[in-house]
Amino acid sequence: MQAERRISREEEPQEQILTGPKKVAALLLAMDKKVASRLLKHFDEDDIKLIAQTATDLGAVSKSVLDALIEEFAMSLRNGGDLIATANEVEQLLSGVVPAEQIAEIMSQVRSKSLQSIWIKLGEVPELSTAQYLSKEHPQVSALVLSRTPPAYAAAALKMLPTPLRNEIMRRMLAIKIVLERPIQLLEGAVKEELLYKSAKNTGPTIHARLADIINKMDRKQMDEILNDLDQHRPKEAEVVRGLLFTFDDLARLSQPALVTLFDGIPADRTITALSGAEPRMIDLILEATPARARRMIEQEMATGKKATAKEVQKARRAIADAAMEMLEKGIIEIASTEEE
């Protein structure tokens, strides 16, 4: 009888302990085929081969083991909080699924590409935001950040810094040597958090800004029609949009130094076209801000009485307003205070 019981116990199937690829294979086999197929599209060829081989060798998985696996998966999702996709998380994901040597090679490539993409994306952040961030950091950190950004972007950010700090950063950039991987990873994380994420959150375009940008491109009649319609149907929204608009007429809101800075870079022929049919007050305001040589040329051309077409005038005025808006966003110029106005 004891022998029979021993033989009977030996014949009972032993419950599997699922680890690594076996968990992945079991979950994929247990879920709906359409869902599993969509998930598999995100795996590369080698991983699919590994999953296929593991699934083939998996054999029978008891209901209790499968239930425990699904519960473990669900519990991880419930207790995990926000998902933070970092290189370390990816490395832990691969652990147990891919050999250690292969993980090291993959992560080396991933970190290298990730680091490169950070500096490319940084070019999308307003230079003023980067300058403000660098002014609070140690000059050595600032030097390392700017040494990895495109030269034009670095120059624009440096222009906004105080002269002593700018000079120190430049000296430190000359002395930068090879930096270890760990400090670079820490810097990468800080740049992501302080510049990329916060900038996207704080300065990302809203629907109001998008609508204002569209309206800015229209002629005055169309602009007034749309704004009047918004005033009737969505007065609060209309007020927000009006605050974001900037047209040629709004140049009168700029400070005199701002106008000088703006028109220092505007071609004389564009100014001539934009002033065609403008109000005398606007003409005087712009001529005062125009460099002397260009001003004489503009006055002589306007004295001939030649007039540009309405389309040409609108295009020239829009180009000047766009240039002013860009400078305002970058902090190069500013709107005049109430007292200055």
Image (tube, rainbow, N blue to C red):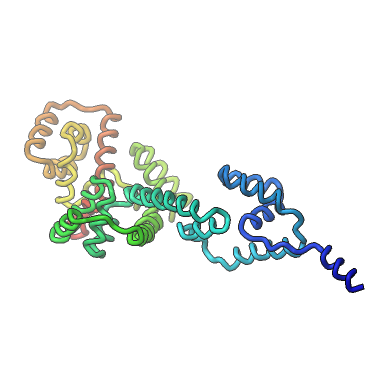
The residue at the point 39 percent across, 50 percent down is 112
Expressed as whole percent of the image width and height from the top left, the position of residue 40 reads: 62, 46
Foreground of the two, 143 or 297: 143
* Residue 250 visible to the viewer: no
For residue 331, side relative to residue 208 (left or right): left
Expressed as whole percent of the image width and height from the top left, the position of residue 72 reads: 65, 65
Quarter of the figure with residue 201: bottom left
* Residue 46 visible to the viewer: yes
Expressed as whole percent of the image width and height from the top left, the position of residue 95 reads: 54, 58
Foreground of the two, 82 or 5: 5
The residue at the point 15 percent across, 34 percent down is 268
Foreground of the two, 339 or 209: 209
Expressed as whole percent of the image width and height from the top left, the position of residue 88 reads: 46, 60
For residue 254, side relative to residue 7 (left or right): left
Q: In which quadrant of the rendered image does the N terminus lie?
A: bottom right
Foreground of the two, 225 or 195: 195
For residue 110, side relative to residue 320 (left or right): right
Quarter of the figure with residue 200: bottom left
Extreme residue in the right direction = 1
The residue at the point 84 percent across, 63 percent down is 11
- Number of callouts: 0
Extreme residue in the front direction = 3
